[in-house]
Amino acid sequence: MRRLFLFVAIFASHTGWSQRVEWLTDAMAAQRKAKEENKLLMLDFTGSDWCGWCMKLKREVFDQPDFAQFAQSRLVMVEVDFPHHQTLPQAQQQANASLEHAYGVTGYPTLVFLNPDGKRVGRMGYISGGPTAFIAKVEQFTRTKNSEVRVTPSPEPEKPRKAVAWTPPPPPIQIKYGPLALKSISGTKERRMVLINNATMMAGETAKVRTEGREVVVCCQEIRDDSVAITCDGKAMELKLGGVK
């Protein structure tokens, strides 16, 4: 019954040498198997269908016959996958997320190694050099007694990628202007300027001014102490601070 359970737990994404190497997805069952067979347990945290370094590690190491031969006699392996283009069963997603949290994984690929008693003895990411270099690093973990060995990977591991929801920007706020109004008079006596609705002008200047849903042409004729003489579309008028005269 146990052999049947472990066979069902083999994950299909590791296809290269899957007929010779078991990839499990049940970490607890894998730990029991590692203890029974006195092997290292290797947890492979991966983004199998989007993480470039994960796919490179699989291609250069896990799919090679030298690694398969080593793994058969020395490792029990668990794939802890976080794919983007396929959906794992809900129970598997929850189990993988719990393992990721428990081992503080923040990038892929991350490989965590446990001894037969379940104690962490090593951690690493992508290693260049194929099966030979990879196996040499794993051998370090089998010799450790009291502390975990961390091997710095060649590149930075890829961070988990989450789909970004695009939020469109809000439409611009339309400012509605009322009748022509003198908003302010500023500057020195020799260099005064006025603000009429949305336009700032000095004496002698002309501007297009928004008013009541349309634009009018305003020419500033004279700036006084509390008012301004203008023409609006050629019509003369005076605007006072606070109202039209």
Image (cartoon, rainbow, N blue to C red):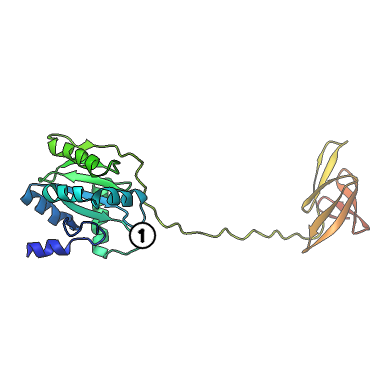
The location of residue 230, given as percent across then percent down, is 90, 52
Horizontal side of residue 145 vs 46, given as left or right: left
- Give the position of the C terminus as an image quadrant: bottom right
Residue visible at 13% across and 34% down? 146
SS at circle 1: loop
* Numbered circles on residues, count: 1
The location of residue 199, given as percent across then percent down, is 79, 51
Horizontal side of residue 211 vs 170, given as left or right: right
* Residue labelled with disc 1: 84
The location of residue 160, given as percent across then percent down, is 36, 51
Residue visible at 34% across and 44% down? 157
Q: Residues within 10 Å of mark 1 (few under 14, many from 20)?
A: some
Residue visible at 27% across and 49% down? 101
Q: Where is 94 relative to 73, above or below?
A: below
Question: Label 1 amino acid?
Answer: His
Residue 123 visible? The answer is no
For this rendering, which residue is in front, 8 or 159? 8
Horizontal side of residue 51 vs 144, given as left or right: right
Residue 119 visible? The answer is yes
For this rendering, which residue is in front, 39 or 166? 39
